Image (tube, coloured by chain):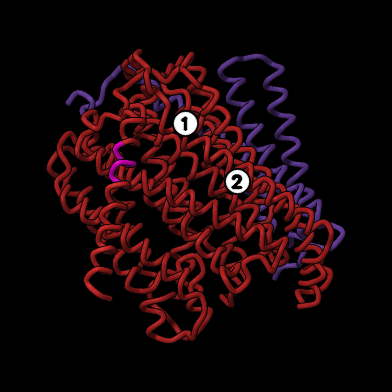
Chain colours: A red, B purple
Amino acid sequence: MNTNGLNKVMENTNAFCKKLLVCRNNFKTWVQLDSSNLSDGQQLSVKYFTVAVILFFAQILFGLLAATQFIYPSFLYEILDFSVNRMIHINAMIIWMLYGFIGCVYWFLEDESGTEIVGLKLGNIAFWVLTSAVTVVVLVYLLVQIGPGKDSSLWFINEGREYIEAPRWADIGIVVVMLIFFYNVVATFSKGKWSGIAGVLTLDLVALAGLYVAGMFYMTNITHEQYWWWWVIHLWVEATWEVLVGVIMAWSLMKLLGVRRKIIQTWLYIEVALMFGSGILGLGHHYFWIGTPEYWLTIGGFFSALEPIPLVAMVVHAVYDSGAHAFKNSNHPALAWIIAQAFGNFFGAGVWGFMHTLPQINMFTHGTQWSASHGHLAFFGAYATINIAFFYLAIQHWRGDVWMGGGSQNAWRWKWALGLLNGGVLGMTIALLIAGYEQSFIERAVEGSTWGGYFTAQNHPSFQSAMNWRLFFGGITFAGFILLVWDLLTIGKGETRKAPEIIES
Amino acid sequence: MIEPVALEDFFITFFSSALIILAGASYALLFAWSKVNPVISIKIAAYISYAVLILSVAELTRAAQFHGYWLIISLVMVIGYFFAPIGIWHLCVKTHTDDLTPTTEEKR
């Protein structure tokens, strides 16, 4: 390339960068968010929230592509295969939720500890490292879709472990970033003050970072391999994430409804005991069919039957509190999403989980669309909802603690976003439930898990019809997401009324 | 050893499992509500929910072919779902009794 050509490229790049800058400034003027309302820690947390929302978009986008391929298998074939779309769909979900959780913790860390974040600079560096790593990993997923499985591909392309496919360099990076996060939390509480919430959070983060290591080494025996792999998948989701959500919920309820610290902490301990008591050995329901000893059938069945107990406790306590206190709140969207969390968690994890968890029936349903049905409602109900609730808490503060209660402007947006997102996910759940029932009945029970049975089930009219409905409701979910983003960017804009200060009841 | 669910019991297994959780939660909800608002009809509704739970557990026990030590799970569900809301209610009362007494942490 000659000098003229190079100059032209430089000029074009400069012009493009200037255009981007103008767009960014125009966007900032339009959203009218005043960052002086945020502390340093909260500014870091909104970075996490921003990436979380972008990844939420990626989750829905790649989910829609994969759902389309169920109906039109040749769609994007050998350009963007189903295996890649599904992988990014699930990976994006795990990572956006983690980003959300980390953002939530950074948001309340200074308030809870009563001091500034100790390693804020380190936290910012970790954010950029993690975000760059996630970008590179996704690009590699898209650019290197097929190839031989070698040691080098484990390190640089794809580890091949379902749900945690990130190559090993990224695995190590994730653990380092989690350790920095852990250091920031512990050092900040140590400098400021400890609380019950702080203690539970710290212990949970040890488990969160530690358990990820269980998914980073290989064993030649597939049973051993799966045994450890489930430690990450199950124990993250049904133990450490649940506790993390409990911590976030505890702090949110104090701020949103004015629930007393002593009560919230006592109940946090009770919930943690119930969740660990049932959730840790509930791991057994993943060990049914991977070649582990038979006693896992009993352990998994027994503890899975106990797993809904924390949810029953939640029902009783909610009724008690509604009778004993007259709670008021000034952030209706956040409270509505917290209520959606209670129902979503109960139905998604409790009802949908127990329906197919006992080994006598699970031997037919394991790994079918039934699992996908349970997964969709449980992940959305238990984790997406609490993150979205927190986004509304954060945006209220970012706007200067403005009124977001009854009579807010354009309240239809958050109500419709809530309805479309929940209706969309519920619709997908029902569609996948029908597909899963048909699949487990025909493919597994009648045809005995043969290839013939697999194709008979996949081509059955009820399965195909269910997949059409799943795509339709995926579209509804996407519409809800667009409305949610629009609402998050505009809610409270121009609102002059201040939110009343919530005091402990 | 487990006996897989028979083909004709497929639906009833899913249905009775779901009903156990729903009836358990309804019983918990109505039990707690009857404590907040002591009306006899709410208490009766709570016990009807619990009766539905027992029937669901019995049906699941039959459909999922629970034998031997597997029957312990049925027993645990029947006893556990009855006493859990009562225990949780007592915890609620105990944890809220000194609502007006701030803790040392709160005083700080």
- Residue furthest out toward the right: B8
Label 2 resides on the chain identified as: A
In this picture, is A445 found above or below A503?
below
Residue A359 screen position, x and y as percent? 67, 63
Q: Residues within 10 Å of mark 2 (few under 14, many from 20)?
A: many
- Of residues A15 and A269, the one drawn nearer to the viewer in this rendering: A15
| Residue located beneath label 2 in the image | A348
At 24% from the left and 37% from the top, the residue drawn is A195
C-alpha span from label 1 to label 2: 26 Å
Quadrant location of the C terminus of chain A in the rendered image: top left
Q: Is residue A22 magenta?
A: yes
Q: Are marks 1 and 2 in contact (CB under 8 Å)?
A: no
Magenta span contains residue A295? no
As drawn, the residue found furthest toward the front would be A4
Q: Amino acid at mark 1?
A: Asp
Per the image, the residue denoted by label 1 is A487
Q: Secondary structure at mark 1?
A: helix
Check disc 2 and report its element: helix, strand or loop. Answer: helix
